[in-house]
Amino acid sequence: MDKIPYRVARTPSELESIRRHFSASTSQVHVTALDEVVSVNSFFTVAVFVGITLTTSNLHVGSPNDAKHECIPGPSTFKRLIVYEVVAFSFFQFSSLVAHGLKLLMVFKNSKEASVDSATMNHKLLRLGILASAVGSGAGTVFLMLSLINYVQLRFGSLVCGDSWVLQAAVPLIVLVSTGVVIFISAVFYAFLH
């Protein structure tokens, strides 16, 4: 294996070239990350709208008098479903708007730079914006999961009754989505702190 010669002294033009290379690749990574956040949020926003349209038909909602029977979900379950879907939509929109705002800031800053490959950015602002966008996506996902749990209860009966159909739908949803959100938020916080 050949050794690559190592030079400590670098010319100013070499240092500028290295700075531009790393700045360009860092900017590209941020833009790609923001694009992915927006695309995932768009998918979840569509899921929320589909969920809202599906919740209004063929649901088993008991009357307030039936609510004392714990296996028949009452009107409050239906109301929680709608509230959770609206809150999920709000978080996804917040996250997407923050990500779009950061992308616009990068584009405008890039248009003022001499180099078209990189942009000088306030990295604290960029990191905080990416963190806020990620937390919005994570919170939206949690509220979407809660709305789906209420939807399952309205279709099959209350979760506390332990019906096998309810458990088959709800348990994997809770375990997998919660695990995914924890991994996602942990990765974002790790990237934010390092």
Image: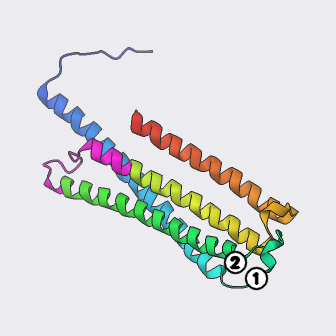
Q: Earlier in the sequence, mark 1 or mark 2?
A: 1
State yes or no: discs 1 and 2 in contact (Cβ < 8 Å). yes
Q: Nearer the viewer, residue 104 or 85?
A: 85
Left or right, 110 with reference to 177 = left
Q: Quadrant of the C terminus?
A: top left
From this viewpoint, is residue 72 visible?
Answer: no
- Residue 14 in the magenta stretch? The answer is no
As drawn, 160 above or below 74 = above
As drawn, 68 above or below 22 = below
Where is residue 160 drawn, in percent x and y? Answer: 80, 61
**SS at badge 2:** helix
Q: Residue furthest bottom?
A: 57
Where is residue 30 drawn, in percent x and y? Answer: 36, 48
Q: Type of residue at label 1?
A: Ser
**SS at badge 1:** loop
Per the model, the C-alpha gap separating discs 1 and 2 is 7 Å
From this viewpoint, is residue 173 visible?
Answer: yes
Left or right, 28 with reference to 71 = left
Label 2 neighbourhood size at 10 Å, few (<14), some (14-19), many (20+)? some
Q: Nearer the viewer, residue 13 or 193?
A: 193
Which residue range is magenta in the image? Answer: 110-130
- Residue 128 in the magenta stretch? The answer is yes
Q: Badge 1 is on which residue? A: 63
Q: Badge 2 is on which residue? A: 75
Q: Quadrant of residue 16?
A: top left
* Residue at the image position 58 percent from the left and 50 percent from the top: 181
Q: Nearer the viewer, residue 62 or 36?
A: 62
